C-alpha cells in the first residue's frame, strides 16, 4: 500500500519535473524567438548603410532610419543611389534655363522615414531656413547634384542645392520660395 503510494508520489514528482522542464524549455524558446524578432526589427531599423566616402549631407530629428547614433549620414554614393530626377528651370541666380540633376527631396525624406511639419535646412555658409514639409509633397523639389551636366562644386552652389520647379508653377515664382533654394546644403533637421 505504502510502496504504491511512494511510486505514485515519485511518478507525480517525475511528471512535475518534466512539466517544469518543458515550461522552462518553452520560456527559453519564447525568449530566443523574441530575441530573433528584436534582431529582425533592429536590422530593419538600421538598413541605412554606413557612408564610406566624405559625408555630404546629415539628416537629424524625427527620422526612423539612422546610421550614426540618431543621425543619418549620406556620402555621394548613397545620395546617388536615390532615384535620379531631372528638372529644367530658370533660377534667380543664374541666366537662362538650366538643367538640374539630382534626387527628389520627397524620396530622401522617405528613405530616412522622416515625419514632421518642418525641415530646417542648413548650409555651409551658416544660412539656415525652415521649410514646410508640404512643399515636398506639393512640388517635385530637387536636391541637385549637377547643373547642365556638371557636378555642383562648393564654389558654385554645390555640392547640394535645393532647386524648386519654379518655371512649372506660378506659385513658386515668389520671394517666399526663393529663400528655400538653399545652396551648399549640408544638413536637414526634421521636426
Ligand atoms: N546657402 C545659402 N543659400 C541661400 C542663401 C544664402 O545666403 N546661403 N540665400 C537665400 C536667399 S535669401 C535667396 S533670395 C536665394 C537667392 O539668393 P541671392 O540672390 O543672394 O543669390 O537663395 C537662398 N539660398
Ligand atoms: Mo533673399
Image (spheres, grey):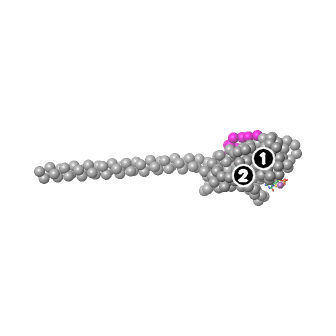
- Which quadrant contains ligand 1? bottom right
Residue 132, which numbered label?
A: 2
What is the crowding at mark 1: few (fewer than 14 residues within 10 Å), some, or many (at least 20)? Answer: many
Task: Kindly identify the residue that appears in the image at 20 percent across and 52 percent down.
Answer: 9
Asked if residue 80 lies in the magenta stretch, the reply is yes
Left or right of residue 18, residue 103 in this image: right
**Residue that mark 1 sits on:** 163
Residue 22, which numbered label?
A: none
Quadrant of image for the C terminus: bottom right
Q: Which residue is the extreme one toward the front?
A: 171
Measured as percent of width and height from the top left, residue 63 is found at: 63, 52
Q: Is residue 147 visible?
A: no
Q: Which residue is the extreme one toward the left?
A: 1
Measured as percent of width and height from the top left, residue 31 is found at: 42, 51
The span from disc 2 to disc 1 (Cα, nearest Å) is: 15 Å
Measured as percent of width and height from the top left, residue 116 is found at: 66, 52
Q: Which residue is the extreme one toward the right?
A: 95
Q: Secondary structure beneath disc 1?
A: strand
What is the crowding at mark 2: few (fewer than 14 residues within 10 Å), some, or many (at least 20)? Answer: some
Task: Kindly identify the residue that appears in the image at 41 percent across and 49 percent down.
Answer: 30
Where does the magenta region start and end? 77-86
Task: Kindly identify the residue that appears in the image at 59 percent across and 47 percent down.
Answer: 47
Measured as percent of width and height from the top left, residue 168 is found at: 80, 41
User: For residue 151, which quarter of the picture?
Assistant: top right
Amino acid at each position: 500500500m505504502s510502496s504504491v503510494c511512494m511510486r505514485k508520489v515519485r511518478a507525480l514528482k517525475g511528471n512535475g519535473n518534466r512539466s517544469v522542464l518543458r515550461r522552462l524549455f518553452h520560456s527559453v524558446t519564447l525568449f530566443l524567438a523574441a530575441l530573433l524578432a528584436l534582431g529582425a526589427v533592429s536590422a530593419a531599423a538600421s538598413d541605412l548603410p554606413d557612408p564610406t566616402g566624405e559625408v555630404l549631407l546629415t539628416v537629424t530629428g524625427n527620422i526612423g532610419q539612422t546610421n550614426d547614433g540618431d543621425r543619418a549620414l549620406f556620402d555621394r554614393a548613397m545620395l546617388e543611389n536615390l532615384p535620379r530626377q531631372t528638372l529644367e528651370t530658370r533660377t534667380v541666380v543664374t541666366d537662362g534655363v538650366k538643367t538640374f540633376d539630382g534626387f527628389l527631396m520627397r524620396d530622401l525624406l522617405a528613405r530616412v522615414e522622416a515625419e514632421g511639419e518642418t525641415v530646417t535646412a542648413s548650409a555651409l555658409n551658416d544660412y539656415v531656413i525652415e521649410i514646410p514639409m508640404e512643399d515636398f509633397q506639393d512640388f517635385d523639389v530637387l536636391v541637385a547634384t549637377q547643373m547642365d551636366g556638371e557636378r555642383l562644386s562648393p564654389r558654385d552652389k554645390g555640392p547640394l542645392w535645393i532647386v524648386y520647379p519654379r518655371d512649372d508653377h506660378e506659385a513658386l515664382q515668389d520671394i517666399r520660395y526663393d529663400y528655400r533654394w538653399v545652396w551648399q546644403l549640408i544638413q536637414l533637421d526634421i521636426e
